[in-house]
Image (cartoon, rainbow, N blue to C red):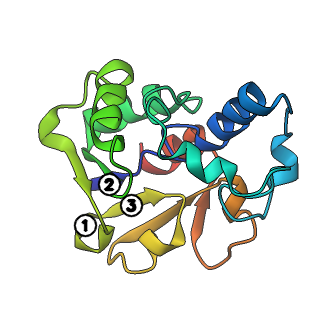
Amino acid sequence: MATIAIDMDGVMADSTQQYIDWYAARYGVKVEKATLLGKPETTGFPLEGVVRQFLYTPGFFRTKPVIEGAQEVIKALQDKHEVYIVSAAMEFPQSLSEKLAWLEEYFPFISWHNIVFCGYKNIVDADYMIDDHIKNLSAFKGQPLLFTAPHNVNVEGFKRVNTWEEVGQLLL
């Protein structure tokens, strides 16, 4: 049995799709996901800087779509391993309560005992960490798994998982 730490944003919750959807709803412009490949997160939109403001907007974290396969694979992982959801939730004021409500809706099988909201993830001690940001994986002492997101497509030096199906094949 392994201990697995799983990030939320960009790994379980589709942050990129949320940026695209919110931008389209507010500015009437549909940005294609492919145009964001290799660009820093929240950049690559016609009006630079506005997408970052979404992170401070009530409802942003609460209404993110679930990444395909996350629910099924995380449930299966939980049946075989010790799974913790580890998310940075301190920087944006409303994110803590919204992330908890989101988990309760989409992942009701995860106990509050297995949810860790923190600032910097360097305190995390697990066998595996699945995250989309190298800043969280670089200091991790276990096996880091980089979950593919548009902002990290050019990152090398980490074992990469592109989908939840791949996570399942690796850890189940």
Residue type highlighted by circle 3? Met
Q: Is residue 112 above or below residue 92?
A: above
Mark 2 secondary-structure assignment: strand
Q: Which mark is residue 129?
A: 3
- Earlier residue among tags 1 and 2: 2
Q: Which mark is residue 124?
A: 1
Q: Residues within 10 Å of mark 2 (few under 14, many from 20)?
A: many
Residue type highlighted by circle 1? Val
- Earlier residue among tags 3 and 2: 2
Relative to 31, 169 lies left or right: left
Q: Nearer the viewer, residue 77 or 48?
A: 48
The residue labelled by disc 2 is: 5
Q: Nearer the viewer, residue 41 or 156?
A: 41
Mark 1 secondary-structure assignment: loop
Q: Residues within 10 Å of mark 1 (few under 14, many from 20)?
A: some
Residue beneath the point at 67% across and 32% down: 22
The answer to whether mark 1 and mark 2 are in CB contact below 8 A is yes
Relative to 153, 132 lies left or right: left
Q: Which mark is residue 88?
A: none
Residue beneath the point at 86% across and 33% down: 29
Q: Position of residue 156 (x, y in %)?
A: 68, 76
Residue type highlighted by circle 2? Ala
The answer to whether mark 3 and mark 2 are in CB contact below 8 A is yes
